[in-house]
């Protein structure tokens, strides 16, 4: 084992049901309740007491690369007769995935032992008492080997509830060739520089759009708007106090809106998700694009891209002024242990294996996901096999978590609706954030 073992972990002390999204949970209706009835009683961890191997269930969304199942097969072979892990596929959509998981965990009868979970889930699951406090098993000395932001995202009320498995971040993609032809030797450092470069390149090259990003009414739209706010010096929470209506936050949301009003971005960005943005960029219809690291791989697919990957540059996101440090939203997935598992030691053995350096390296190269162990960004095989780990390293290391709160799912729904209305010009950034501050504070206070 690479991570240390330890005592049987204590459970989170939060109340059952804390952090449940009222709007989303109620929408599950009777069909979700019926689904729970089919799960059967008890968790995994069966078999050990009867002489056979301990049987664990690991849940994650479908993996088209097959790399996860291959690692599970290796683990089972290495632990033959002792531990046997079964891979249970969950919905690919993160929101549906979370709703289904939460419905099962509420009953205390989920079959899942080890949860592959989104980076925004730890506080919500921990506050409800549904996942194990890993602080004793995963001490500070072990956490130092991981990137800072994923560790922070898994920490709630001073305890750590997950081990970072792979990560994500927002990147600025740009047409290196078009910038050079227009006389620009470096990517933009500020939003004003991005607008200037985009306008100049569009005029010279006839490229259709200057900048595309994700502004639709979904979690990605929330992430994009938060990056504008953060990179303008604003924030959402200060402890339990909502501060999203600060002048800096207004400046950030105003900048996002100005991308449309200044003609840099098409009006359609308010409906774009990752795929719509990357399709335009790889067709050669945009100079700049904000997107996630996995989109870089599409540039090497002739069926997806008309652009030579060598023509694509990658940089950190712009900031409001050069005195600010760039940041982006931490994404990725982690490993949690269900508090109801019958064998937390066996579950920890599996978590340790899957998050160890060798397995993270395998997933980086074979599964095209970014590792959470900092040292792997210096590994030449990783840098060669997953070029975006090298090209986007600065942005990946400087990312930050979204607001860490047991009530984040409700907060996100409110922000998604408000941000897209601001982007569309239906409500001014000032009024948007003033109203949003009251709504978010109400969610926190009610919780």
Image (cartoon, rainbow, N blue to C red):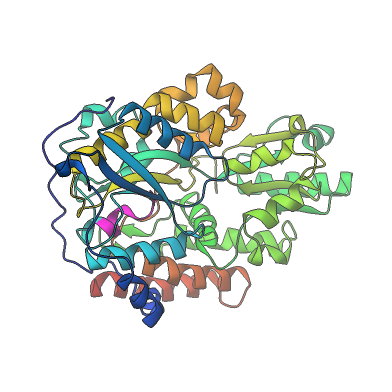
Left or right, 45 with respect to 414, comes to left
- Image quadrant containing the N terminus: top left
Q: Position of residue 386 (x, y in %)?
A: 58, 29
Q: Position of residue 195 (x, y in %)?
A: 70, 50
- Viewer-closest of 260 and 149: 149
- Image quadrant containing the C terminus: bottom left
Q: Tell me, yes or no, if residue 368 can be seen here.
A: yes
The residue lying at 83 percent from left, 54 percent from top is: 208
Q: Tell me, yes or no, if residue 212 can be seen here.
A: no
Magenta stretch bounds: 117-125
18 up-or-down from 131: above or below? below
Count how many numbered circles sit on residues in the image: 0
The residue lying at 45 percent from left, 40 percent from top is: 167
**Corner quadrant of residue 24:** bottom left
74 up-or-down from 316: above or below? above
- Viewer-closest of 121 and 193: 121
290 up-or-down from 269: above or below? above
256 up-or-down from 210: above or below? below
- Return the residue found at the far front: 51
Left or right, 302 with respect to 267, comes to right
Q: Position of residue 183 (x, y in %)?
A: 80, 33
**Corner quadrant of residue 271:** bottom right
- Return the residue found at the far bottom: 30
Q: Position of residue 41 (x, y in %)?
A: 23, 64
Left or right, 104 with respect to 376, comes to left
- Viewer-closest of 336 and 154: 336
The residue lying at 49 percent from left, 46 percent from top is: 328
The answer to if 393 sits in the magenta stretch is: no
């Amino acid at each position: 084992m690479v991570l240390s073992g330890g005592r049987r972990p204590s459970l989170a002390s939060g109340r059952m049901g804390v952090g449940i999204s009222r709007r989303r949970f109620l929408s599950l209706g009777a069909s979700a309740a019926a689904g729970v009835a089919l799960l059967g009683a008890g968790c995994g961890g069966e078999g050990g007491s009867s002489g056979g191997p301990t049987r664990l269930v690991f849940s994650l969304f479908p993996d088209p690369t097959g790399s996860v199942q291959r690692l599970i097969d290796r683990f089972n072979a290495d632990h033959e007769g002792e531990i046997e892990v079964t891979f249970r596929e969950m919905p690919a959509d993160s929101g549906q995935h979370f709703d289904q998981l939460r419905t099962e965990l509420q009953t205390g009868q989920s079959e899942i032992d080890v949860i592959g979970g989104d980076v925004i889930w730890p506080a919500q699951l921990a506050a409800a008492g549904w996942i194990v406090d890993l602080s004793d098993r995963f001490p500070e000395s072990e956490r130092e080997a991981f990137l800072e932001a994923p560790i922070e995202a898994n920490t709630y009320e001073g305890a750590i509830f997950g081990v970072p498995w792979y990560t994500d971040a927002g990147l600025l993609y740009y047409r290196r060739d078009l910038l050079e032809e227009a006389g620009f030797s470096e990517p933009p450092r500020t939003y004003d520089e991005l607008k200037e470069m985009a306008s100049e390149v569009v005029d010279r090259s006839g490229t259709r759009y200057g900048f595309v990003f994700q502004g639709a009414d979904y979690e990605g739209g929330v992430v994009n708007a938060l990056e504008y706010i953060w990179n303008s010096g604003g924030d959402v929470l200060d402890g339990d106090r909502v501060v999203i209506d600060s002048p800096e936050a207004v400046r950030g949301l105003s900048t996002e809106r100005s991308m449309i009003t200044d003609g840099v971005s098409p009006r359609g960005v308010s409906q774009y998700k990752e795929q719509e943005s990357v399709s335009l960029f790889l067709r050669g219809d945009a100079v700049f694009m904000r997107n996630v690291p996995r989109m870089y791989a599409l540039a090497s697919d002739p069926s997806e891209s008309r652009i030579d990957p060598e023509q694509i540059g990658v940089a950190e996101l712009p900031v409001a002024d050069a005195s600010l440090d760039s940041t982006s939203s931490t994404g990725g997935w982690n490993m949690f242990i269900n508090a109801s598992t019958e064998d937390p030691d066996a579950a920890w053995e599996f978590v340790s294996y899957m998050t160890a350096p060798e397995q993270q390296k395998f997933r980086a190269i074979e599964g095209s996901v970014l590792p959470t162990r900092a040292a792997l960004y210096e590994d030449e095989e990783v840098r060669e096999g997953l070029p975006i780990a090298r090209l986007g390293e600065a942005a990946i290391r400087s990312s930050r978590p979204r607001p860490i709160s047991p009530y984040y799912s409700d907060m996100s729904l409110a922000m998604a609706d408000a941000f897209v209305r601001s982007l569309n010009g239906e409500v001014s950034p000032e009024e948007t954030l003033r109203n949003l501050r009251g709504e978010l504070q109400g969610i926190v206070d009610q919780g």
